[in-house]
Image: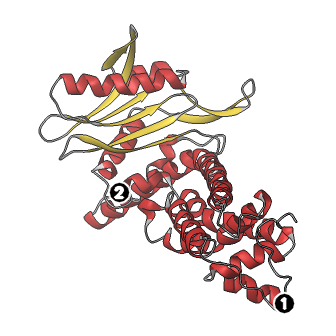
Amino acid sequence: MKNFKLILKSLFSNNAAVEGARHRPWYFAVIMFFVSMVLALVPIFVTNVSKRGSDVVKNYSYNMDNLSLRFSEELKNKNVELEVSYNEAEKKNILITDQSAWDAAFPETYKFKDVDYHVYVHKNEAAQNDLLAYYLGAMLSSDLSDFAKSVEQFYKDSNTNLPSLIIMTDSQFVVYVCNPQRGATIGSVVGDYQSTKVGWKLNQLLSEKPHATADEYAEYRAETWNNWKSFYDEVYNKNRITGTWTTTLIMLGIDAALVFFMGLMVFILTRGKNNPFRIYTFWESMKVAMWAANMPAVLTCGLGFLITGFMQVLFALLIGVRVMWLTMKTLGPNNAPTPSSNYKEVKTVTAKPSKK
């Protein structure tokens, strides 16, 4: 019970944090350190694992609902099927189609590295291209990125509004959503087909609801758009998981390094000749930083969800403030330790005895 009270007290009291670091077993500090790391990483982990591919159109569709519907209808009308298949050689799902059927259905082409790629084009009321959809076959990821940049540069050089893009290869699916009012890309979805069932076809995104009346058509369009958004989530799923763990582990390394750096600062700042705390060893200084990390971690866990823009730097700011405050106010030269009746008196540096 005394240990629990001391831990709670150390959230607010620097003296309690120092007392815990010096007078409690070393594993208390280690436990405090790991708990603090977990708490500090909760907002980052939850935020990243909660991301969805459809977040790019979460608040506004940027007309992608209508454009996706038109593309789906065109695939159906021209009998072009894109199906997920399992590639035994590469041990992964891929998207395949009858290339000749795709090329015949969409005769307009775009040249990239001396190769003509056939493209579905949708034009708006002003006869401007507002959606382009490509199937590029077995194009490599690096080439796909260059392909997208070349399309964007083409429209910039032409001084025309950049259309939204759907780019499909056998192993990747990419969507660049463009704001038609600003003519600028506002976000993208990048993913693969590893979370999609083998045998599933892109044509299944088109709703099968009847749409003869206005109300039926509204439901038909809404269901098709919901299917597309679910597909965005599906293709992004692998990247979401990988990105979550990558970001979390990177931040774990950064936060852990900050705690050890703060322990080093405690050790350095108590080395003054007149500082009674200069007897603290390097390991004891590290334990002080570990105990002092608890409140910054708790605040980061709470504030990280409220101040998302500063989520990744909150812990660094808070632990820096606390340890500097602790070092100056509690472990400064003018703050001699107060012995506790429950613990051994803290030794301080004394002058050497004079020789007789």
**Residue 303's x, y, as percent?**
49, 72
Which quadrant of the structure image shows residue 171?
top right
Could you tell me which residue is drawn at 36 percent across and 37 percent down? Answer: 74
Name the residue carrying label 2. Answer: 221
Question: Which residue is more in the foreground, 270 or 64?
Answer: 270
**Residue 3's x, y, as percent?**
81, 85
Task: Check the image and report above or below for 168 versus 269.
Answer: above
Could you tell me which residue is drawn at 51 percent across and 28 percent down? Answer: 169
Q: Amino acid at mark 1?
A: Asn
Residue at the far front in the pictured view = 356
Question: Which residue is more in the foreground, 147 or 257?
Answer: 257
**Residue 37's x, y, as percent?**
68, 63
Q: Which mark is residue 342?
A: 1
**Residue 167's x, y, as percent?**
43, 32
Question: Which residue is more in the foreground, 100 or 54?
Answer: 54
Residue 98 visible in the snapshot: no
Task: Check the image and report above or below for 348 versus 224.
Answer: below
Question: Which residue is more in the foreground, 316 or 111?
Answer: 316
Dot placed on the residue nearer the N-terminal end, 1 or 2 = 2
Which quadrant of the structure image shows residue 220?
bottom left
Task: Check the image and report above or below for 24 versus 200.
Answer: below
Could you tell me which residue is drawn at 63 percent across and 82 percent down? Answer: 13
Secondary structure, mark 2, is helix
Q: Amino acid at mark 2?
A: Arg
Count of numbered badges drawn on the protein: 2
Task: Check the image and report above or below for 249 versus 301.
Answer: above
Categorize mark 2 by other alpha carbons within 10 Å: few (<14), some (14-19), many (20+): many
Residue 232 visible in the snapshot: yes
